[in-house]
Amino acid sequence: MRIVFATSNPHKLKELKEIADSFGAEDIEFVLPPEGFDPDETGTTFEENSLIKAKEAHRLTGLPALADDSGLCVECLNGEPGIYSARYADTPQARIDKLLKAVEPFENRNAKFVCAMTLIGQDGDVIFADRGECHGTIAKTQAGNGGFGYDPVFLVKGKNGLTMAELSEEEKNEVSHRGNALRKVLEFLK
């Protein structure tokens, strides 16, 4: 089965394929949408933006489409950067620096990564939607070379003070918000 994964981010596609393979879903071939895929994410929630992306990927390809919208929600920042995680600042490092500065005065550094996934069938209708979360805290300094985005400053709950960026790909995929959401989608597809 071919499913277009509604992203222009090759890191996300790689992560998705690794999670699907570890789940035993090798019969699903995830492909990228055509070049230039860049829908306006005008939703006010992760779920709304996920739906917007899935619909656009299906419209462009005619294939079943899977989309995610994900981000980091920090308690002391009232859930920010939230749906604006990728647009919080101009570069990945600038986003991390801005986040660390914003949480600096707070003791409560609890945070979670959220991933909403929407699956659209061949006919263009939503056939499944759910979300996955990964809980932790924001570190005082960044550590680790793995992952992307806010991974170097996200201390994963239950991982002995390691950031998401310090985990192996397998460990990250087991606990990540995207992994948790995708496993629900794959369970549905079985």
Image: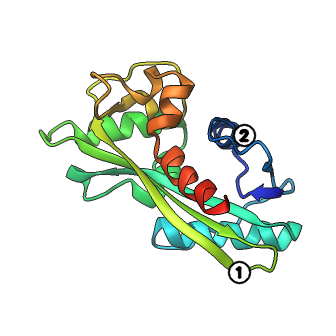
In this orientation, does residue 190 appear? yes
Q: Where in the figure is residue 177, as x and y percent of width and height?
A: 46, 47
Q: Residue furthest front?
A: 190
The image quarter containing residue 136 is: top left
Report the number of numbered marks: 2
What's the CA distance linking mark 1 and mark 2? 26 Å
Residue at 48% x, 36% y is 174
Neighbourhood count class around disc 1 (C-alpha, 10 Å): few under 14, some 14–19, many 20 upward:
some
Question: Above or below — where is 43 with respect to 87?
Answer: below
| In-image side of 155 versus 68 (left or right) | left
Q: SS class of the residue under badge 2?
A: helix
Mark 1 lies on a secondary structure that is loop
Image mark for residue 46 = none
Give the number of the disc on residue 10.
2
Amino acid type of the residue tagged 2 in the rendering = Pro
- Crowd rating for badge 2 (residues with CA inside 10 Å; few <14, some 14–19, many 20+): few
Q: Is residue 78 above or below residue 159?
A: below
x 69%, y 44%: residue: 9
Whether the residues at callouts 1 and 2 have beta carbons within 8 Å, the answer is no
Looking at the image, is 99 positioned above or below residue 181? above
Say which label, 1 or 2, has the lower sequence index.
2
Query: Which residue is painted at 46% across and 73% down in the image?
Result: 44
Q: Position of residue 138 (x, y in %)?
A: 29, 36
- How far from the left and from the top, in percent, is residue 121? 75, 73
User: Which residue is disc 1 drawn over?
Assistant: 125
* 6 on left or right of 60: left
As shown in the figure, which amino acid type bears the numbered disc 1?
Asp
Q: Residue furthest left?
A: 107
Q: Position of residue 11 (x, y in %)?
A: 66, 37
The residue lying at 38 percent from left, 53 percent from top is 81
